[in-house]
Amino acid sequence: MTDVVAVLDCGSNSTRLLLASASRGVLRREMRITRLSQGVDASGTLAAPALARSYAVLDEYRGFMDEAGAQRGLLVATSAVRDASNGEEFLLEARRISGVDSEILSGTQEATYSYAGATVGLEPSGATTVILDIGGGSTEMAMVRDGALVSYSMQLGCVRVTERALGRGVVTPASEAAARAMIESELDLAFSAVPAFAQVAPNVRLVGLAGTVSTLAALDAGLATYDRAAVHHRHLSRRTVERWRDQLGAETPEVRLTHPGMVPGREDVLAAGLHILDAVMARFGVEELLSSENDILDGIAASLLRGDRA
């Protein structure tokens, strides 16, 4: 009997797969931009084209799972599906295609698994480690305080901020002001709900994960092709965040795609993600970020391999 497990993450902007084994480690990682959250913020419904894109990718992933002999797994959905009136319908079809259990994670569950995954392999630090997971529809922050995990899930994400405020093209002063106001309002809620965030600042080691940070790291490294070793645990300064935020904001999505490291499908939403990232760094008073390619997928896979989940 194989010990391979599969984790599928149906996020707001991408659909991802991790195949892992207790004896052989990570066997495969896959990511496809599916933009499941297309229009959800305005309509409250998962759109038919977005569903079709996601189902096609899940069918492809099922083939990879069969090749690897994965007999156990979990499919998780996050912000877009939480917010959609037809989220449960999507989950049923996703379960049928993937052949594994599926569930919608709460913001707290997202943060818990993301923290577990992102902190694997980190060197000890005298600072408090805070993980920042910028998704398409939501953004999670989490840390351990007095031996317990504390977290907050903000209604912020690169797709949500793009659709509601910043826009997909060249950023205007008006759209930038609207995006900043939206982000600051959510940060006010987060720091009010979790006073410990303010109490640890600025003695914080901020660890960023997911597409916005991963793409920023690739842009900073000038990668024409993905190289995990070049982006995992890469140090990124706030100045770098601001430079790319402003440069991409002044460009059209077509021009943004010409930069080595830009991932097709992120060119229209990355500027919004960088606005979120810069605002969080400012709120914590930190000038550096550590990128992590380990994330929620790794946290869930570890749980499956330990037998925490059937």
Image: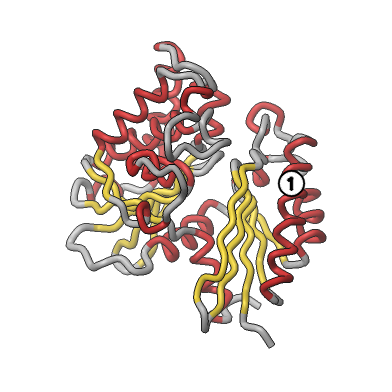
Q: Nearer the viewer, residue 250 or 108?
A: 250
Q: Residue 276: give x, y in percent of width and height.
A: 40, 34
Indicate the quadrant where residue 103 lies: bottom right
Question: Would you place residue 248 above or below residue 119 in this image?
Answer: above
Work out which quarter of the rendered image holds the N terminus and state it: bottom right
Q: Residue at x 17, y 62 (%)?
A: 126
Query: Relative to residue 135, is residue 102 drawn left or right?
Result: right
Residue 202 seen from this side: yes
Q: Residue at x 56, y 61 (%)?
A: 29
Question: Would you place residue 133 above or below residue 260 in this image?
Answer: below
Query: Relative to residue 26, is residue 16 drawn left or right?
Result: right
Furthest toward the bottom, the residue is: 1
Q: Residue at x 44, y 29 (%)?
A: 271
Label 1: element kind: helix
How packed mark 1 is, by other alpha carbons closer than 10 Å (few <14, some 14-19, many 20 or more), is some
Q: Residue at x 77, y 35 (%)?
A: 49
Residue 152 seen from this side: no
Work out which quarter of the rendered image holds the C terminus and state it: bottom right
Q: Nearer the viewer, residue 172 or 250?
A: 250
Q: Residue 2: give x, y in percent of width and height.
A: 66, 84
Question: Would you place residue 182 above or below residue 58 in this image?
Answer: above
| Residue beneath disc 1 | 87
Q: Nearer the viewer, residue 13 or 139?
A: 13
Q: Residue 42: give x, y in percent of width and height.
A: 66, 26
Query: Relative to residue 45, is residue 163 drawn left or right?
Result: left
Indicate the quadrant where residue 80 lies: top right
Query: Relative to residue 185, is residue 96 drawn left or right?
Result: right
Q: Residue 267: give x, y in percent of width and height.
A: 51, 31
Q: Nearer the viewer, residue 236 or 156?
A: 236
Question: Would you place residue 24 above or below residue 247 in this image?
Answer: below
Amino acid type indicated by mark 1: Gly
